[in-house]
Amino acid sequence: MVQDVTDKLQTFRRVLVTGGAGFIGSHFVRLLLAAGISEIRVLDKLTYAGNLANLADVLSAPAVTFIQGDIADPEAVAAAMAECDAVVHFAAETHVDRAILEPAPFIQTNVLGTQVLLNAALAYHVRRFVHVSTDEVYGEVLVGAVNEAAPLRPRNPYAASKAAADLLALSYYASYGLPVVVTRGANTYGPYQHPEKLIPLAITNVLEGKPVPIYGDGLQERDWLFVTDHCRAIAFALADGQPGQIYNIGAGNHRPNREVVRAILRLLHCSDEWITYVTDRPGHDRRYAVDPQALMALGWRPTVSFEEGLRQTVAWYQQRRDWWEPMKQGEFAAYAARNYGSRQRMG
Ligand code: NAD
Ligand code: TYD
């Protein structure tokens, strides 16, 4: 799976993965283990989005250590980072709809937490700090695709908090020489994604016999990147990225939301009548699109087509009701009532 970067990754002995109990972070822990990294430390607060079940198959591996802690807590971070030679920083509040309802945790974790990590990385002289960011920092890109020099125009509190963290990370390279690499990945999907996000929400709603809410006209476009391709891209940035550089990660799989949901419905043998159009998200970005040429120059290519990735994802959620059914109770139900309860049906 990671043959192309395995040898290079093995120059790292101890890697700290923040947010490794979340969606993309847990896949990345599996990638590091498969690459033969001798010590992988996972630092995760286990918020509503963190789930040790995401790591169930790797937690007993001698190379993997799990530490429950907050990235904004300097003591927890110092203990977790001691003697690490690399940090791959995934931990974040990640859901745009939640950021619109309540921005404060996004600033606390994404901005202040990142600064605590950067300070510790300086103190421990880490050889590489990969800051995992998002294409949402560029704001909406109505035509074409942007490269890493494009201005940042975030339009919701999640994207703004990630943009602030990106700039902070890059400032630690310019001001202190910390070997920071920033990645800006596209919308990611695959197994173990929290059912609050569009693709797993659509699949699990249908499996529960509930309609699928589409915001506005459903013609907003995202570039869908399969999670293992995103993780391989981050591995390339970790192994070969230039300190102080930014790497866009895009798969070239642009699809309007309406088409994504229809493809899911077809895979589940359901008609379009399962779709309910509801009031749009405020400040909803119409389209994201990044040019990943800088990363491709390092040798990375996406390998999973959207059709294949979606087929695998739907099959996984069909098989893993044990994983997602508990996640749609309690906390999620309260959030969903707040988020969807206030939206009108548009017909
Ligand atoms: P996720 O919400 O599934 O997981 C986030 C993880 O971070 C959870 O395990 C959570 O417990 C942990 N966490 C949150 N606050 C923390 C804190 N204060 N201290 C320690 N741990 C904390 O997120 P994801 O989708 O896996 O995203 C991971 C990273 O990738 C994020 O930085 C996100 O901005 C970025 N990203 C995500 C996407 C996407 O489409 N999912 C795309 C591009 C970039
Ligand atoms: P999401 O998965 O929340 O990712 P992001 O907002 O970070 O792109 O949403 C993907 C797209 O799907 C986005 O355009 C918003 C839209 N969407 C819906 O139409 N209905 C929903 O219930 C959700 C959660 C998202």
Image (cartoon, rainbow, N blue to C red):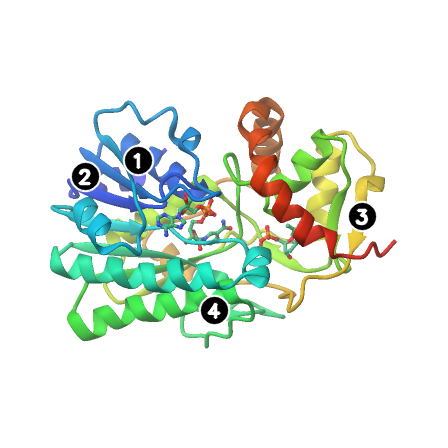
Q: Position of residue 78 (x, y in %)?
A: 18, 51
The answer, for residue 308, to whether it is visible in the render is no
| Mark 1 neighbour density, 10 Å: few (under 14) some (14–19) many (20 or more) | few
Identify the image quadrant of residue 32: top left
Q: Is residue 194 left or right of residue 122?
A: right
Q: Is residue 9 visible?
A: yes
Quarter of image, res 310: top right
Q: Is residue 345 above or below residue 20?
A: below
Counting from the top left corner in percent of width and height, residue 148 is at: 41, 69
Q: Which residue type does callout 1 highlight?
A: Gln
Q: Amino acid at mark 3?
A: Thr
Q: Using the image, tell me which numbered label, if any, was put on residue 198.
A: none
Q: Are marks 2 and 1 in contact (CB under 8 Å)?
A: no
Q: Earlier in the sequence, mark 3 or mark 1?
A: 1
Q: Can you tell which mark lies on residue 3? A: 1
- Disc 4 marks which residue? 160
Judge whether 71 appears above or below 17 on screen.
below
Q: Earlier in the sequence, mark 3 or mark 4?
A: 4
Q: Are marks 4 and 2 in contact (CB under 8 Å)?
A: no
**In whole angstroms, how far apart are the C-alphas of marks 4 and 2?**
34 Å
Identify the residue shown where x is 24% and y is 61%: 118
Sequence order check: which comes first, mark 2 or mark 1? 1
Q: Quadrant of residue 1?
A: top left
Query: What label does residue 10 carry, if any?
Result: 2
Report the residue at 82% width, 41% height from top.
272
Q: Is residue 285 left or right of residue 263?
A: left
Tell me the amino acid under the disc marked 4.
Ala
- The numbered dot on residue 276 is 3
Q: CA distance from mark 3 to mark 2?
A: 49 Å
Which residue is drawn at the image coordinates 15% and 43% (left, top)? Answer: 11
Q: How much space separates mark 3 and mark 4, taking CA atoms?
A: 29 Å
